[in-house]
Image (cartoon, helix red, strand yellow):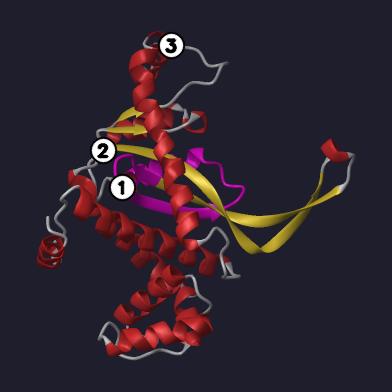
Amino acid sequence: ISVPVSDAIFSACFKVYSGMSSRRFQSDLRDMKEKGFVSRAWHFNAILGVIEDEGITPLLHQLIAATAAPLGVVESAFAVDSTGFGTQCFYRHFTNKHGGREQVSRDYIKLHALVGTKTNVIAAASITDRDRHDYNEFAPLLTEGAKSVTMAEVSADKAYIGRSNLAAAAAVGAEAYIPFKVNMVDDPKSPLWSKLFHLYHFQKDEFLPHYHQRSNSESTFSAIKRLFGEILRSKGFVAQANELLLKVIAYNITCMVHSIFELGVTVPGISACTEAALVARGA
C-alpha cells in the first residue's frame, strides 16, 4: 500500500460508511484532513487501490475482532448465519420451472457472520462466493470469534446441523442450539448429537427460546443493508470482499457507540469522551 496504513484503513472505511461515490467522497476526506484524522486528502484512485489490495484483508478481519471485543462483556449468546450482497454483475441460467426460459439474476457474494444476539455486533465474518455452503463456515467463524469473545451458547438454522459443527461449538465452550432435519435420527454413539437430539424433540420449551435468538442475525443483516447499502460498488472479488468487510467494521462501530450509551460499556481510549458526552446529555 503506497498510502500509510492508518490513512488507508480510515479513508477506505469512511468512504464505505459515507455511501458516496469516490469523487463525491473527496470533500469529506478534505474535511478529515483539516481535522487531523488523515495526513493528507488522498486522491480517490488511491482509496480505490486500498480497497482492491488483498494485503489489507487480514487487517480488516483483525479490526472486526477489535471492534467486537469491547462488547464481549455483555455478550454470551451468538448466532451464525449468512446473507447475500449484490454485485455490479449479472448471471444467466436456464430453469425447467419456467419452461426452460433463460433467467437473468444479479450476481452476489455471501457474508457469513457470527453475531452477538444482544448488541447485534459481528464478532467474526467471512466472505465467499454465492455457491459456498453455509455449513462449512460454521467452525471457522467460531474459532475466529473465540479469539475476541467468550461464547456460552451459539444458535443456527438447520443448514448448520452436523456432528463436526456440534464438536466445533463444544471446542470453544459453547452450547449449540441447532434444529434437526426431519429425516435425522438419534445417534447414541455421539453424546453431543444425542443430547441435542433429545433436547430438540422432547424439551421444546427449553430449546426454542435459545434457538430463536438466531433471529437477531436477520436484524443485523437488515441493519447493515439499510445503513450502508446492499449493492457493492467494487467489481473484482477481492475488492468486493474488502468493501463488505469495511461495511461490517463501520456497522460494528455503530453498535459500539450504541452500547456505550445504552449499556454503559467502557471502551479503552474513549472513556473520557464518553463521560463528557453523557454529562452533555444530562445523564
Q: Which mark sits nearer the N-terminus, 3 or 1?
A: 1
The answer to whether residue 1 shows anywhere in this view is no
10 Å neighbourhood of mark 3: few (<14), some, or many (≥20)? few
Total number of numbered labels? 3
**Residue 136 percent location from the top left of the image:** 49, 41
**Residue 196 percent location from the top left of the image:** 37, 18
Task: Give, as a three-letter code, the residue at label 3.
Answer: His
Location of residue 142 with respect to 197 vertically, above or below? below
Task: Give, as a three-letter code, the residue at label 1.
Answer: Gly
10 Å neighbourhood of mark 1: few (<14), some, or many (≥20)? many
Dot 1 and dot 2 residues touching (CB under 8 Å): yes
Q: Which residues are magenta?
A: 114-142
User: Which label belongs to residue 145?
Assistant: 1
Q: Which residue is mark 2?
A: 151
Task: Name the one closer to the observer, 215 or 244.
Answer: 215
The question of residue 239 being in magenta is answered with no
The question of residue 136 being in magenta is answered with yes
Task: Give, as a three-letter code, the residue at label 2.
Answer: Met
Q: Which residue is mark 3?
A: 201
State which quarter of the image contains the C terminus.
bottom left
Which mark's residue is nearer the viewer, 3 or 1?
3
Q: Secondary structure at mark 3?
A: helix
The answer to whether residue 95 shows anywhere in this view is yes
Residue in the picture at 44% in, 78% down? 50
Q: CA distance from mark 2 to mark 3?
A: 24 Å
Quadrant in the rendering for residue 47: bottom left
